[in-house]
Image (cartoon, grey):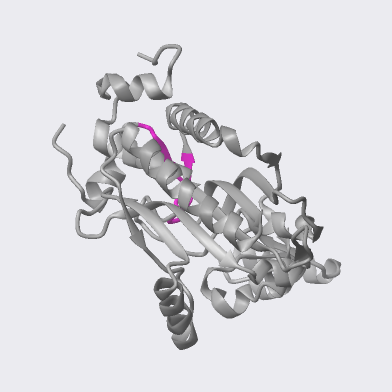
Amino acid sequence: MGVRFELQSCHEGLVEHGLIIPTGEPGVFGRSAVFEDVLERFNDLITQAGTEDRAETCVFPPVLNRRVLEKVNYLESFPHLCGSVHSFKGNALQALALAERARAGEDWGDMLGSTGVALTPAVCYPVYPGLAGTLPAQGRIISILGWAYRHEPSDEPTRMQSFRVREYIHAGTADQVSRWRDQWLARGIALLRALQLPVIEQVAADPFFGRAGRMMANHQVSQQLKFEVVVPVISMEEPTAICSFNYHQDKFGQVFGIRTADGEVAHTACLGFGMERVVMALFVHHGWKLAHWPEAVRQQLWPKGAPA
C-alpha cells in the first residue's frame, strides 16, 4: 500500500470506509464495529504484555470530582484543556428564558452553574486518591481503560476531544517506579513494532499553559520525566504520539498522602496508550480493509482467526 501521510486523506479514508462517524463537532465522532474490534484486540495485547505486573483493575466513569483537579493544580497548568460540567440550577421562569435562548440559537451557557464534577482529563487521576495511606512493600500497580476529555477541537482525526486511554499506574519507591516505567517503555515499543508500526521513542513534555508552563515543560524534558512513542499518521515531519511513559516523582504522593512501606512519600509513574490513535495508525499503515493487512499483524490481533 502506498501510504499518504496527509490530514485530509487520513480523515477521508476513515470516514469513507465507515470507520468513524462525524457528528458535526470537531474532534467528536462515532466509531464503527470494525474500529471497535481492532481497539478491543489491541487492548487484549496490552493486557498480555502486562501480565507479570499482576495489576489491579479499576473502572471509573468519565467524570471526576473537581476537587481532584484543584488539588493537583490542573487549572494552573492546563486551563485551556479543562472541561468542567455545568448544569441548570434556576427556577421555572429562568428555565423558560433558557429554552428561549436555545430556540433562538443564542448562547445560554451563562445560565448554568458548576457542578461537583469535571470531565476526566487524564485517566490516571481518579486512581491517586484511592492510593492514600501506606503501600505494601512492592507498591501497587493499577490497570485502567477509561475515557479522557481535553478541549482541543480540531479537524485533525488524531486530535480528539473525547478519547480512550489504556493506562497502568505504579505507586512505590522512586527506584521501583522509575525502573518499571523504563521496562514498560521497552515493552510498548516491542508491542507496537510487532504490529509493524514504524515507531520511535522521544523525550517529550506535556502541553503546559503560558510562560510558566514553558519552564515546566523544559524541566520535564531536561529530567527525562516523559517519553512518547510516535508514528507517522497524518505527517512524516510531525509524527503522532500514540503512547506516553511518565514519571511524576513524588508529586501525587505528596498531594494525596501516599506513603511507601518504610514511611517515605511514594513516587508514581504511569504509561498510557492512546487507543483510537493506535487504531488509526494501523489503518493508515496497513490499509482501510482488514483483509489487506499483513498476515503477521492479523495473527497478532486475532490469534483465533482474523475477520474476512
| Placement of 124 over or under 40, stated as above or below | below
| Placement of 41 over or under 99, stated as above or below | above
Predominant secondary structure in magenta?
loop
Relative to the observer, which residue lies in front, 175 or 256? 175
Residue 227 appears in the rendering: yes
| Quarter of the figure that contains the C terminus | top left
Tell me: 197 left or right of 223.
Answer: left
| Residue at (73% x, 72% y) in the render | 255
Q: Quadrant of residue 95 in the image?
A: bottom right
Tell me: 18 left or right of 94.
Answer: left
Q: What stretch is highlighted in magenta?
A: 18-30
Whether residue 28 appears in magenta in the rendering, the answer is yes
Tell me: 7 left or right of 97.
Answer: left
Residue 207 percent across, percent down from the top left:
45, 71
Residue 223 percent across, percent down from the top left:
44, 72
Relative to the observer, which residue lies in front, 196 or 162? 196
| Residue at (26% x, 51% y) in the render | 234
Q: Residue furthest left?
A: 2
Relative to the observer, which residue lies in front, 263 or 241? 263
Whether residue 77 appears in magenta in the rendering, the answer is no
Residue 211 percent across, percent down from the top left:
45, 87
Residue 43 percent across, percent down from the top left:
51, 34
